[in-house]
Amino acid sequence: MAEDNSPFGAARALTLAGPLALDGGASLAPVDFAYETYGALNESRSNAILICHALTGDQHVASQHPVTGKPGWWARMVGEGKPIDPARHFIICINVLGSCMGSAGPASLAEDGRPHAMRFPVITLRDMVRAQAMLLDHLGIETLQAVIGGSMGGMQVLQWAACYPQRVRSAVAIATAARHSAQNIAFHEVGRQAIMADPNWRGGDYYADGEPPTKGLSVARMAAHITYLSEEGLTEKFGRRLQARDSKSFGFDADFQIESYLRHQGISFVDRFDANSYLYITRAMDYFDLAEEHGGLLANAFAGSSTRFCVISFDSDWLYPTSEAKTIVRALNAGGAEVSFVELPSPFGHDAFLLDTPGLNTAVDGFLKAGEGA
Amino acid sequence: MRPLRPDLAIIASHVPDRASVLDIGCGDGGLMAALRETKSADARGLELDAADVATAMAKGLSVVQGDADTDLADYPDSAFDYAILSQTLQTTRAPDAILGELLRIAPRAFVSFPNFAYWRVRASLLFGGRMPVTGALPLSWYATENIHHVTIDDFRALLREQGIAVEQAWFLSGNRQRGAGAANLLAEQAVFLLGR
């Protein structure tokens, strides 16, 4: 909880009365929000940038993570002298609906004082975006200079541009897609089944005794983590090298470095993420299909839009490959929208948007600055 | 800003104020930037090379990474006032199809290309027996991106075949404009303004 009453600053929390009507038919009231802001709104309230985070991301975009102690997940992009700069932008990042870092989700408390757990309604990307709009309304932010995000953050960017075209002047969608493919859904289903197969999951009611389904969540994270990397990157980083041993053990220890690395990724993930949130958010992503909401034609989602778009993909990203980005670009062109698109080279796979990728910051910087000059 | 290449300078000076243009093969966006600055044009670009696209984006230009041979189909009919294809026609797989695409997405199109019947080119082949390397064709045969060499007369013949109108044409040798007389022999480059 924030120590002062200002709605702006690091580690803010706010509860709005709602109700928030959801795509699934249910509605949510009240609605909890956890978010952070950096920089100051200018007098004309025209310098706000909304950063949308990815599946397991959070509002700590450029501040230390309270659990892991690590720097903000996008400190490379956000900060003094960076493309998104608190010296000239008012930056806001909101923990998405369904997540577990303070916004309403399965781990947050229901009216009866117990966590919602699986009583939490199934949500969509559009519900997440509507919730964000509700908070921005409350904060008096009508127009956004830009909405920007990678991966699921990029999906929210597209959803924002489709739902609120008049509120979004520039949209930056990185390493993302306008819908989840069968392969995307398949990987998520593996993760969900791993969680639900953990005897500690117990239909989602594991909050009371502090015995969450860590094994299942850890396996889900391991499987997902593979999809965030490229084969080239894995080979370069680990190859077939053995982990702290000279020869194979002829057992099932983590003989290989890659095994050890993945186990570490899985184990450290469970300290900071809620298994039920993982179920809800992956479900929301799987339901995402922007064309479906617009008569099956993606171009309709952006028809007549005056939003400027910047779409970026990475050549080694096989989770949301360049072909998905080009589908978005094609739809934007068909709708007559102003769009830039580039496929950047990177060995890092899908994770490239979070890492040092040459060209990423300069492209985003140039795109944002051109929008500010207009 | 660097001075524009001579063919681009001709194109830039003939684009009307506030026109919407698609520059196909826009490179790092030099022409687009000039059109934005001097003509307040709504300029969009298409470019194959990722590094060029990134450079153009860093200048704040709207450029899409893509291939003229395959990606022009993504643009709706009459989406722009002008399509521009400078020094790119001879690098495409299907130049004849691309001319049709240009005039589908815009009522008018500027096309510039190096003239393969320029006398120095002819001389290089006739007397040297070698593929020409000239100012307008600076790369050796193995390094050039030009896969469909074309002469001014070839181009005019294709336009006649496709029923495409020539609204204006300019000819260059070196950096200087010259008349239309014997252009197929004496012009190193040509710039055409085409209409439907």
Image (spheres, rainbow, N blue to C red):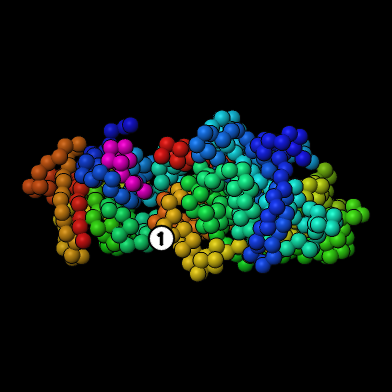
Q: Quadrant of the C terminus of chain A?
A: top left
Q: Nearer the viewer, residue B89 or A71?
A: A71
Dot 1 falls on a residue whose secondary structure is: helix
Q: Position of residue B125 (x, y in %)?
A: 20, 48
Q: Residue furthest left?
A: B181
Q: Residue furthest right?
A: A209
Amino acid type, callout 1: Ala
The answer to whether B100 is drawn above or below residue B185 in the figure is below
Query: What residue appears at the point 68 percent right and 55 percent down from the top-left corner?
Result: A18
- Residue A275 quadrant: bottom right
Is residue B75 in sight in this rendering?
yes
Image: magenta residue range: B34-44
Q: Nearer the viewer, residue B190 or A65?
A: A65
Is residue A255 inside the magenta stretch?
Answer: no
Query: What residue appears at the point 60 percent right and 51 percent down from the top-left corner?
Result: A133
Q: Position of residue A149 (x, y in %)?
A: 58, 48
Q: Position of residue A261 (x, y in %)?
A: 76, 47
Is residue A236 in sight in this rendering?
no
Query: What residue appears at the point 46 percent right and 63 percent down from the top-left corner?
Result: A300
The answer to whether A244 is drawn above or below residue B196 in the figure is above
Query: What residue appears at the point 65 percent right and 61 percent down from the top-left corner?
Result: A21
Is residue B42 inside the magenta stretch?
Answer: yes
The answer to whether A189 is drawn above or below residue B184 in the figure is below
Q: Quadrant of the N terminus of chain A?
A: top right
Q: Nearer the viewer, residue A58 or B123?
A: A58
The residue that disc 1 covers is A334
